[in-house]
Amino acid sequence: MKKPIWLSIQWLILGLLAFAMLGTFAGSVISSVVVSKNNLEKNYLIENQYYAQKLAATTDSLFEDMIKNLTTESQNINYLTNDSRKIHKELEFILQSTTYFNSAFFADKTGRIVASAPDMALDGTRLNSVGAKKSLEKKVPIISKPYVGVTGKLIMLISVPVFDDNRSYKGFLAGSIYLQEENSLTKVLGQHPKHENDSYVYVIDSEGNIIYHPVKDRINDNVTENKVVKQVLEGKNGNLEVTNTKGISMLAGYASAT
């Protein structure tokens, strides 16, 4: 009669050993999954930061090229003539030879538009916008913050001063970017692939205003309260796991342009 008891104990021990082994295996699998998930998230954060740095450099280079293009063009003698027809042709050349701007104009030192393109509808208009006032005041190359221009469109103004041979100030040459329409920023940054994890990119100016976002309604929103944006405005590069405005957890990489 003892044999069955011994056998039952034996099977109980084997059962406990088997359970312990399965438990150890299950714990190992769970631990492996957690480690794998953490490693995957870390890799995503690093990749996103690297990508953000590339895009920051690309955006920075784009604006530098805009300034260089306008600076070279501003040396054209036609801008000293105040002949609106000649200047209009030069402005058309700017728009046709590059994809930087949606429109362009030349304003004299009083802020009056002498000529504009692609049409001449703004000729003679006296400017009092933030961007124009800053260009007239500073007399240096300017990249404005977003504002509503005389056309009623949300724009960024890229402008350079125009001087004659005696370094006398004659006005400024400007290109406008229509932020809520197809523009040079959307052409460059819109190439970002929409991955299966719904990643996206956006760009802010130095005051925390969104100047590029795949959702156009977000453009010109001020997002300085975003903790990632705060890091960028301090000139930092890095990555963070954050929760966006919709309550979705995101793996964010960020970088500051010079």
Image: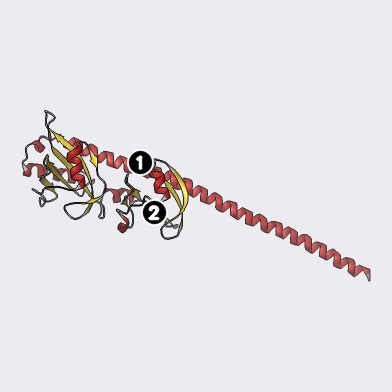
**What is the three-letter code of the residue carrying label 1?**
Ala
Q: Residue at point 51% right, 51% down?
A: 41
Q: Quadrant of residue 85?
A: top left
User: Which residue is pictured at 86% across the width and 65% down the height?
Assistant: 9
Image vertical order of residue 141 relative to residue 241, above or below: above
Q: Amino acid at mark 2?
A: Tyr
Give the numbered dot on residue 200.
2
Instruction: Choose between 177 and 172: the one closer to the eye.
Output: 172
Q: Residue furthest top?
A: 166
> Which quadrant holds the C terminus?
top left
Specify few, some or many for label 2: CA neighbours under 10 Å numbering under 14, 14-19, or 20 or more: some
**What crowding class fits label 1: few (fewer than 14 Cα within 10 Å), some (14-19), or many (20 or more)?**
many
Which labelled disc corresponds to residue 257? 1
Q: Is residue 106 left or right of residue 183?
A: left
Taking the image as shown, residue 78 lies to the left or right of residue 186, namely left
Q: Residue at x 85, y 64 (%)?
A: 10
Q: Is residue 117 left or right of residue 184?
A: left
Q: Disc 2 on helix, strand or loop?
A: loop
In terms of image quadrants, where is residue 174? Answer: top left
> Picture coordinates of residue 227 (x, y %)?
42, 49
Q: Earlier in the sequence, mark 2 or mark 1?
A: 2
Image coordinates of residue 165 in percent, x first then y, are: 11, 29
Under circle 1, the secondary element is: loop
Extreme residue toward the right, this view: 1
Task: Kindly check if marks 2 and 1 are in contact, taking CB atoms under 8 A apart as contact.
Answer: no
Q: Nearer the viewer, mark 2 or mark 1?
A: 1
The one nearer the camera, 184 or 143, is 143
